[in-house]
Each structure stands twice: as C-alpha cells, then as structure tokens.
Amino acid sequence: MTTAVAAGLGATLLSSCGSQQLITFGDMASGYNREVAFMSIFAIALSVIIFVGVSYALFFTVNKFREDKNTAEPAQFHGNNRLEVILVVVPVIIVMFLALLTVRSMAILNPVAEQSTKIDVLGRQFWWNFSYPETTANAGGNVTNGNELIMPTKQDVALTITSGDVIHGFWAPNIGGQRAAMPANLKTWNVDTDRAGIYQGNCSQLCGGSHANMRYKVIALDQERYDTFLAAAKAYRAPEPATRSPEARGYNLFMKGKPSTGALACAACHRVQGTTAAGAAGPDLSFFGTRRTLGAGMWEAMTPEHWEAPDAKAELHAWIKHSPKVKPGSLMPTYDGSEYLVTGKKVKGGVLTDREIDDVAAYLRSLKLPEEADYWNETPVYGSTDAADNTSAQTAKTSSPTPGGNQ
Ligand code: CUA
C-alpha cells in the first residue's frame, strides 16, 4: 500500500517524440524517497485522523447543544479550563511528535559516510559539471563529465554541490531531494538508488533566461559497470586524430581557433582530458562522443547512430555555429560573425566556414570512451514504455529555446 500511494507522488511523464521518462519523488528505489514517503504518509494519515476527530467533535457539539425550539436565549457561558488545557496540550504534543519524526529522518538521511562515492557538482548558467574528486586520470586532473552524471547503485553517493555564478537547484527527484547549488558554498548531500537506469535531472531554481534548458541525465550503473566506466575514464586520453582527417583539422581549430577571422579557440573554455585543453569556463568535453545529450539536455541523440544521424549532426552544427541563438543566455562565442554578449557588452564573433564547423564537430564526436565503458548502452530509461528506448527513440529537441519556455 505504501508503495502504491508513494508511486503516485509527484509523478511526471516527460515525453519526447515517443520516448517517455517517469520523473517522481515517489520512486521507491531510492532510500531517500522511501524515508520521505514514510514521513509523508504518516503525516497525511495523522492529518486525516485529526480532521475526522475535529469534524466529529464539531458536529457532535452543534447537535448536542443546539436550542431546538429557538424560543429562549441559548445558555450563555465562557471559560472551560479543562477544555482549554486539552486544546493547547494536544496540538503541542502532535507538533512535537512530527518534529521528532522529522529530526529522525534528517539524522538518517543527512550524515555522509566516509565510504560513500564522492562526486562534485558544479552548476553554472546553464549547464552542470560532474567531477570525481577521488579519481586521478592518467592524463592528469580528475575525471569530469558535463551534464551527464554517472553514479553507482545500491550505496550512498555524496554530492558536494556548488555554483559558479547564481543560485541553481539540483533536482533529480528519482534519486533524492532537491538541493540548492550556491556560489561560494560547498554542501554535501546523499543521493541513492537501488535500480540501474537513466533518470532526469533539472535545475529547480529560476536562474536566468535558459533556466528551463539546464537539464542533466543521471545514469545509475550497477557496481561492476560503474567500475568499468570509472577505470576507462581514468585511463582515457583523447584519441589522436589521423593526419589530414576532418578530426585533425577540427582538433587544430579546437585548440587554436582561427585568429585570422577572430574565431576563438574552444580549448580556452573547455577541458578535454589527455590534451592541452584545460578550460574551466564551459562544460568538460572529454567524453563528448559518448554523451547523448547536447546543450545541457536541450537535444538528445538517442538513435543508434547518435551524433552521426543527420538531424543530430544538424543540431550540433547549429550549436557550434551560433550557440546563443539556439540557447538564450549561452555564453559561448558565435562562429558566424554575428554579435554576442560578453559581460553585458556586445562583441563581434569570429568566423568559421560550415566545413570548418563540421570539422570541429567531427573532432568532438571522436572523443569517445571505449565501447565497454559506454554508460548509455543497455541502461534502461526509467518509466519508459519502450524497453529499448535509449536506442530506438528519435533525436528529439526536448525543450523550447524561448526564455521561460517549458520546464
Ligand atoms: Cu540553473 Cu535554473
């Protein structure tokens, strides 16, 4: 019964071109949600009992003490010490009891165990970085991924959440509670799930023009697959492009830009593990080719061809060419010569030809983890009506590019 009631709590279906995802804090695979559901059902049940009790007392009193003939003035009296004491003491006991239960839940949920898996979460306008502070990559630095959070199942995962600019909200309801990401503030919270799967996360704090376009995916993997991912991610070095290939030309543009037309180097803002690109102003792109979301979840490339599918390629091309046009508030420079904003001032962007943009895209698509570490493979989308959802769904534009669009 508990499960049935809880399953309905806050359930939302996100659909995008036939693929569906169930977002709910009634997901009982998470110990956090189980505790919250216990608290909620208990508090609701208690409220129902109080409602019935108070209603009964009201009707009983009105009925018993009414003046039927309505001829004489009703009996006049005031003050009833016993009743007044009861009416003060009973609610105080109820409130204290609920407070105790809340403190008990907090004592269970909040402590971060030493042996928890630790992941650092950074929110920025309008994307997320997830980095693994206990890893040291062979190529240097910590393993980091943009907008796709990979975590192990069946254990507490300690997220240390912060923001690089304004206040954001980290919320993936299926794995735990909503948490504020605040600048200059590091706070660690647990999330957990017993079930391997793909879950949706959103920014839950209004943070600017693309607040609704600040999404992420949580990919929960069973221990063995998680270990495989983490080992491959630690060993990962971005592949060396073959000489004179599109990837090689893209690599050069990525690292150096094109100074003759004012096109800025991507490497100034993005990190790619195993190269000299170590920028931190934008999302980590080390595993871009393995990722299946673009623009912090604005687009998904879920067909078997992923970024090689023609429509996915078109989205990627448009994204590199003029990111602020397809995502309001994006801080990426433009590469079609149009103006974009840098700290409120209009700046003219550099120019890359369409072929050069495709070369950069080809380089990005080549940044792949080894096949066995592809965390999307065979990981079911939770709540999907289609068992093979993550391989058969269409490339979908999942949100409106207008400010304050859907959420
Ligand atoms: Cu970040 Cu809303």
Image (cartoon, rainbow, N blue to C red):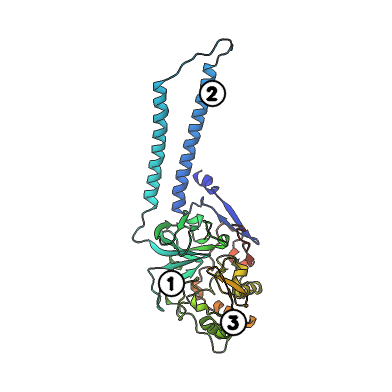
Q: Residue 143 — which label? A: 1
The reply to whether the residue tagged 3 has its Cβ within 8 angstroms of ligand 1 is no
Secondary structure of the residue carrying numbered label 3: helix
**Residue 186 tag number:** none
Q: Hey, what amino acid is under mark 1?
A: Val
In percent of the image, x 48 and y 42: which residue is there? 41
Q: Is residue 129 above or below residue 357?
A: above
CB of residue at label 2: within 8 Å of ligand 1? no
Label 1 environment density (alpha carbons within 10 Å; few <14, some 14–19, many ≥20): many
Q: Are marks 2 and 3 in contact (CB under 8 Å)?
A: no
Judging depth in this view, the residue of 237 and 337 nearest the camera is 337
Q: Which residue is mark 3?
A: 359
User: Of tags 1 and 3, which is closer to the observer?
Assistant: 3
For mark 2, what is the residue?
59
Mark 2 vs mark 1, CA separation in Å: 66 Å
Q: Position of residue 255 (x, y in %)?
A: 51, 82
Taking the spot 59% from the left edge, 83% from the top edge, the residue there is: 261
Between residue 54 and residue 203, name the one nearer to us: 203
